[in-house]
Amino acid sequence: MRPISRSLSAPLAALAAAAGLFLPGVDVAAPEAAAAQKVTFTLDFEYAGRHAYYFVALEKGFYREAGLDVEIVRGSGSADAIRAVGAGRAPLGFADAGTLVVSRTSHGLPVRVVAMVYNRAPHCIFCLEEAAVRVPRDLEGKKIATPPGSASTTMFPAFVRATGINAEKITRVAVDTSALPAVLASHQVDCVSLFYVAQPLLERRLAPKKITRLLYADAGLEFYSNGIIVNDGFLQEQPDVVRRFVAATVRGMEAAFAEPAEAGRIMNKAHPQIEPALGQAEMEIVRDLAVTPLTRAHGLGYIDPKKMEQTRDVVVEAFSLPRRVPVEELYAPGFAGK
């Protein structure tokens, strides 16, 4: 007697399943997986090495394994990303928590954070070495280029408040992010406002000129910065999609932090204008911003309620906002961390 086959043809398997037949020793094939759900994710700025972990998750199939078909689009600043997510043009994005506090308080945008990436504030002012800017007070009398909508620009009032410098003695000019290295190299300005993660790119573009930097964190400003944001309506309607996206992204972070050189190569493959070495250097800085005692204890992406409250309070005081939005409206717990 011939043995019973351990597999059935697809039509027969479907018929057996429909009829409720479960034959001993026979494996009934699982139904074809549902099509991956399309999700648009907006970055805070143009593609850069600091975003490599998203493309690692894409390249290694982490999003696909989570049942997601993710499109990663460039942004034009944290404020722009928050507006896009708030308007539903993209359900998920990457943006600065401080900028979100302003947007939520002043404009009521329905956006909140579900996972934190930059646990240390990366906001920074870079200056030409010859401008002799060593301490915040040295910025007085200088000209600073600030990109519209960027988190460093948005949070500048907090830096002014923390350092006690006279903002009226500082000339600020709006310059697009991509043009910042050029205007600094040509001495059109003395300084530029960027994130710390931009240092490798800036140094490369300005060589052999040297630069100095002032970190907002060195002025005592400890607050959350960039994380994964989500539209409130989307979060309420499709929490499982958000959970799967965050989990896949965290896998991308873990892989990129473990092998930043590989992350640089993957980023270069996706966007050839980003040199692998530059992608690696930026990813190493992101790792320093993301991995802290708090995330070692609670997992990457974890949001601490007290630090989120501290972030809100820093922004409220710096901007003299009329009210303190309940911290529960600024983030959603349970989507990242152990």
Image (cartoon, rainbow, N blue to C red):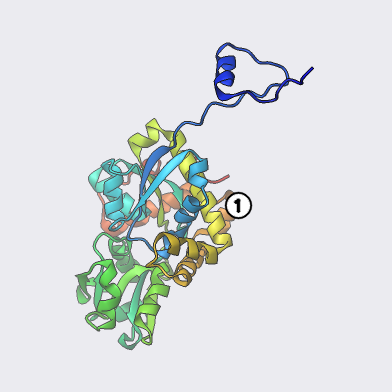
Given residues 331 and 270, the one toward you in this image is 270
User: At 46% from the left edge and 51% from the top edge, which residue is drawn?
Assistant: 116
Quadrant of residue 137 in the image?
bottom left
Q: Quadrant of the N terminus?
A: top right
Count the numbered circles shown: 1
At mark 1, the secondary structure is helix
User: At 37% from the left edge and 75% from the top edge, which residue is drawn?
Assistant: 202
User: At 23% from the left edge and 45% from the top edge, which residue is drawn?
Assistant: 107
Any part of residue 294 in sight:
no
- As displayed, is residue 107 above or below residue 193? above
Image coordinates of residue 88 in percent, x first then y, are 28, 40
- As displayed, is residue 206 above or below residue 254? below
- As displayed, is residue 337 above or below residue 143? above
Q: Residues within 10 Å of mark 1 (few under 14, many from 20)?
A: few
Image coordinates of residue 154 in percent, x first then y, are 28, 60
- For label 1, the residue is 297
Given residues 110 and 185, the one toward you in this image is 185
Given residues 221 and 332, the one toward you in this image is 332
What amino acid type should be assigned to the residue bearing mark 1? Ala
